[in-house]
Image (spheres, grey):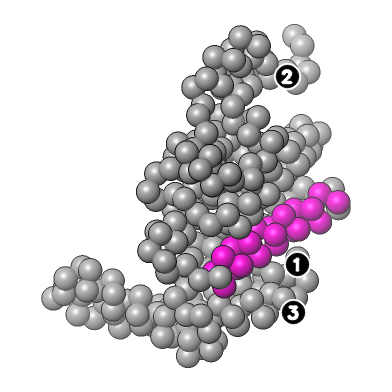
Amino acid sequence: MDSSPRLPIQPTESDAASYEAKKPIAKFHIELSSVLDPELLSLYQSPPPLDEHGKEQDWQNETLSFLYGLHFDHKYYPVPESVFEASQTFFKFAYFHLVPYCTARNLKFKSNWESHDLSGIEKSIVMKYMVPDIHGKLSKRYQAGLLRKGQIELVAAVYESMIHQWRVLMDREAREGFFEALHSGYRVLMDLVLEIRSQRLENLLLKYIAASEKADSVGVVEGIIRASRTLEDDVRRMACQDREDRDPSDWRYNYYGCRERAWVILYG
């Protein structure tokens, strides 16, 4: 039996033509003449390759649809151009550099359990939903006119830091650390950067990141998250003390307000 790896089954030209006709570009991009990455746009408008079982390898479709397709026209997903460009850069590196590296290294060391860290990074739920989740949160504030420049810069900084960490690991031909960088960056964005409502805190984080090497940028914010956890647990307990007697929306407002004030006191 042939044990060599099987290459994906590539679609025919007629398959590609019919597929492209079903993949319209978001009207938002057309109206604003958005700068669309040609390689990613071509990937979006081409059918995904098939695996050895004839099934679509569609892990990238979720992100590409939110970047270029009609999902981007949805009321929850238009974002500032600078965020869109940063998301393109992040996904392009992940698709064309990170995933091929991890796949090749995992095949090379498939008999070694230490290489398990590299298997299936492209199928990670975090990888699949990172860009949609970030755009979803930012878009609501953007459309309400509440999105500040500092928050946009922080998102781009965390993206850049994740890419830098992956480059360093790849240059070292590492077999570990890739998932950690992905999950750490996602937590930093979703648990802190996209929750911040204090301009003072945003400016402080940007100052720390600017003073650090790119490889340490996520580490800076990760350290702040760790330092905040104990304090946040106390805040949650205080906010929950009379939760049973309060309206849920009122409780959420009290909780987020307490947390924001705690962040400002601790870091501002």
> Label 2 sits on what residue type?
Leu
Residue extending farthest to the right is 172
Secondary structure, mark 2, is loop
Tell me if residue 253 comes above or below residue 169 in the rendering: below
Q: Which mark is residue 7?
A: 2
Tell me if residue 108 comes above or below residue 136 in the rendering: above
Residue at 76% across / 58% down in the picture? 164
Q: Quadrant of residue 38?
A: top right
Secondary structure, mark 3, is helix
The mark closer to the camera, 2 or 3, is 3
Q: How many numbered callouts?
A: 3
> Label 3 sits on what residue type?
Ala
Between 212 and 79, the one lying in front of the other is 79
The answer to the question of whether label 1 and label 2 lie on touching residues, with beta carbons closer than 8 A, is: no
Q: Which residue is labeled 1 in the image?
A: 214
Q: Which residue is labeled 3 in the image?
A: 211
> Label 1 sits on what residue type?
Lys
